[in-house]
Image (spheres, rainbow, N blue to C red):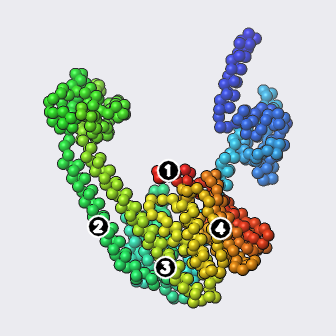
Amino acid sequence: MILELRNRVPQLAASDARLRSVLDLSDDSYWEQDEHHRLTFLSEALERCIGAPQSVRGKTRWELHPNGATPEEWAAHWAAIDAHLPFRDFEYVTSVEEGDAFHIFVSGDPVFDPDGSFKGYRGIASDVSPLRRREVALRESEERFRLTFEHAPVGVAHVALDGRWIRANQKVTELLGYSRDELYRSIFPDVTYADDLEHNLRQCARMLAGEIDTYSMEKRFVRKDGTIFWANLTKSTIRDAQGEPLHFVKDIQDISDRKSAQAALTNLNATLEQKIRERTVALRESEERVRQTAEVGGVALADWNRSTGGGHWSDRAFTSLGFYPGEVEPSFTLWTELVHPEDLPRMLKMLEHARQSHTRFKGEYRVVWRDGSVHVHECRGEFIYNSKGNCTGGRGVWVDITDRKKDEEIRTARELQLRRALIRDVHHRIKNHQKGVAGLLHAIVKKRPDVREAIAPAVAQMHALSIVHGMRGGDNEPIVLSELIEAIVRLTKSLAEGAVEIKCDIEVQPGTCVIDDESVQLALVINELLVNAVKHSSPSAGTPMVSVTLTGGEEEICLEVVNTGTLPVDIEERSAGQRGSGGLGIIRTLLPTKGATLNLAENNGDVRTTLRLQKPVIIFVRGETGAVTH
């Protein structure tokens, strides 16, 4: 008996070693504690998580700086372990020697010796810190969405399928003149001008039927006081995972002023629409020619006998491989010799998979004629099996699609050319519309000096947006940072009308550009910095001065705006407590979350505003090749 026990000791040790190795490889960690709840063993994974073993072993879990759980949860946990009961998924936060905090999920079972005496606990623990960090990030993302929704410069609303208002931002209530409670007691048709309702409902029906995903229309709205205003309505449908519609999202932008200036653009719009129709017809004719060419193209037929290696080819098969009909003996081996060396391994793998899985095959490959010319073929076929399931041969067809490939390249180039032309036209129209609106607002300011302070920022912002659209001319072409700043400086000088002197000094390497996704926001930020500097400049001697300096390299670009004057006493409250309201609040809201920092300082009667830009906000376009470094 003793000899048997001695023989089993190595086996038990090996088994224990294997178990501990598996536990170390697992995402979960293993732990043990004695009858006084002191930790006696931790797996390597748990030691890596909460610290070195010498700082943990011999301590209870509540001696490791625990928090996160409520007193009631700790009380229930202590009661369970004092009663020597199993516990599951108890979560708390722990840190070792004032180090990093870890969110721990712990489960344990009591351990008793053969006579029933309590010897402690053993169990598993999981580090759920990454999960908790993702939850924090999700909450922050939701808060950013809420702020974006609430402070959007256009009206944004969620509307139920039956027309009830579900949610609306402040801009919607301002446009319609209703409080939110009043708005939520109404339905969308109540605020729609009667003559525009039928078309609006017809488009909604098309969206619900799945014919379109979104639409935009210019329509009239009726305010609470009965007045009417024009707006551009953009509407889309939110659907569930099964594709069923849940509610609508509506963007409402007041275009009343623009409508008054729109008559002059009618001829331009008609010309543009005619060009689009002509180009669309030309594109369809080109596609039809390609389709007809493919339909009249010849199809090669071939079969193959596995036992003999030979087979039969149609005349088209011979000519599509560069031979006269019957010039060579058809075989699978000859076909493999003609397939382009770069495509042959892929084609053989595809054929072998189809043979073993008893499925049909389809592929595209190149063949090299004896004169060295390369042709593209598209093939499809199947293998033939006997009653025992053994492959006896195969049959298939192929088509020479070389001409079709060339036609596709030509069509793609034409489509790209058309798309770029349309993008340039659209950006040009948007720029002109925005400049027209800004011009009307500027005229109002001249007639009504008393509203200058309220309207001037909007005029500058509209001009800044028109600058961005004016610089865009292709498929998300990056905007050169120096050109953007120079354009905004010229704009600000024009709006200042000589009341403030503005100097601009730019020293950055060519090709320093703004990423397209951030160009509009960054233009508004830079515009707001200059407008604020001009607005708050105070003369020290003669005309107030504002200087703009742009310097830096690939690691960081620095924009400094300096004006004479002092910072407001409540600048910190404006910056942190009123995010999204006022000039500085707008800047903080629009500032990119990554790659951009803003700092304000006052020194010797000057206010210095420093905007630092790094990647990914800034990109660098290399030379004439257009290579981009992010």
Which residue: 57% across, 61% down?
Answer: 481
Per the image, the residue denoted by label 1 is 627
Rendered image quadrant of residue 459? bottom right
Q: Rounded to the nearest whole Å, what is the CA distance between mark 3 and mark 2?
A: 29 Å
Question: Viewed as shown, does residue 256 lie left or right of 573?
Answer: left
User: Nearer the viewer's eye, disc 1 or disc 2?
Assistant: 1
Image mark for residue 548: 4
Alpha carbons under labels 1 and 2: distance apart: 34 Å
Corner quadrant of residue 45: top right
SS at badge 2: helix
Q: Distance between the residues labelled 3 and 1?
A: 36 Å
Answer with mark 2 or mark 4, whichever residue precedes in sequence: 2
Crowding near the residue tagged with mark 2, few <14, some 14–19, many ≥20 C-alpha atoms within 10 Å: few
Query: Does the residue at mark 3 contact the one at mark 1 (Cβ under 8 Å)?
Result: no
For the residues bearing labels 1 and 4, Cβ distance under 8 angstroms: no
Residue depicted at 67% across the width and 69% down the height: 547
Q: Is residue 221 visible?
A: no
Q: Residues within 10 Å of mark 1 (few under 14, many from 20)?
A: few
